[in-house]
Amino acid sequence: MNTFATALTFLTVIMASNIGGALAIWKHAHVTFYGGSDASGTMGGACGYGNLYTDGYGTNTAALSTALFNTGKSCGACYQIVCDSTKVPQWCLKGRYITITATNFCPPNYNLPSDNGGWCNPPREHFDMSQPAFQKIAIYRAGIVPVIYRRVGCRRTGGIRFTINGRNYFELVLISNVGGIGEISKAWVKGSKTNWLTMSRNWGSNWQTLSYLNGQSLSFKVQTIDGKTRTAYNVAPSNWGFGQSFSSNVQF
């Protein structure tokens, strides 16, 4: 059995209890880290989540390279990652793995080669993890390590969250803390005086509608890329205001 097959056997054994379904395909990638020892530098980012603690993601997060980010459609996706000890045993914390959420974009740096600084250049699949997350699977001094990863479902505490920004006739809704497959494919909003209105992705996990919904209680419907849909009725009361966040009682 070759070293990669051996690694896959090991990974399957230690992770089987965490997936609860069919095994996803394992792939090769590399990881680096950013954001400081307290992960404060990871807040905000290209998915629009803002404070990753209040939005339900904590420090187990990563910025994705262009090949993985998919122009923001991968925001909220979860990945299991293991340092590839068959290649760099001196840097890996053997037997450790982590599940991270995609919360940011790692931009390419075309001034540097892909194998020496331009880690997020296409077509490389690369994770720039928070420092605390990186140090759960590898030694800080390594800086960059090869990994094996796969897509997995996301486990969230509490319901899906909706943060309403914008102004009259423009609602920009950040949808966060989404469980299940994690990636949103469609979203709708319904005022207490309207039918269901289709929203469009503005950027990251922010969805918009050009409607006047002031003074109406709001319901939301969210569909993920696996076709599953959840409906959160009357999440925002009629006196909601821009800048406010509301937690639902539904989850994938």
Image: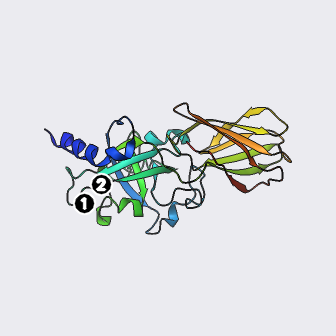
Q: How many marks?
A: 2
- Residue sitting at x 35%, y 49%: 81
- Residue sitting at x 42%, y 56%: 129
From where the camera sits, is residue 106 visible?
no
Q: How is the image coloured?
A: rainbow
Q: Nearer the viewer, residue 68 or 199?
A: 199
Element under disc 1: loop
From where the camera sits, is residue 166 visible?
yes
Q: Which residue is mark 2?
A: 145
* Residue 220 spot, x, y in % from top left: 70, 41
Element under disc 2: strand
Q: Nearer the viewer, residue 223 or 231?
A: 231
- Residue sitting at x 40%, y 59%: 133
Which label's residue is closer to the chain start, 1 or 2?
A: 1
Identify the residue at the far left of this view. 1
How far apart are the two marked residues, 1 and 2, measured between alpha carbons? 7 Å
Q: Which residue is mark 1?
A: 91
Badge 1 amino acid: Trp
* Residue 250 spot, x, y in % from top left: 62, 45
Binning the other alpha carbons within 10 Å of mark 1 as few (below 14), some (14 to 19) or many (20 upward) gives: many
Q: Quadrant of the C terminus?
A: top right
* Residue 56 spot, x, y in % from top left: 55, 56
Task: Please say if the residues under marks 1 and 2 sit with CB atoms less than 8 Å apart.
Answer: yes
Q: Nearer the viewer, residue 63 or 96?
A: 96
Quarter of the image where one finds residue 202: top right
Binning the other alpha carbons within 10 Å of mark 2 as few (below 14), some (14 to 19) or many (20 upward) gives: many
167 horizontally vs 133: left or right? right
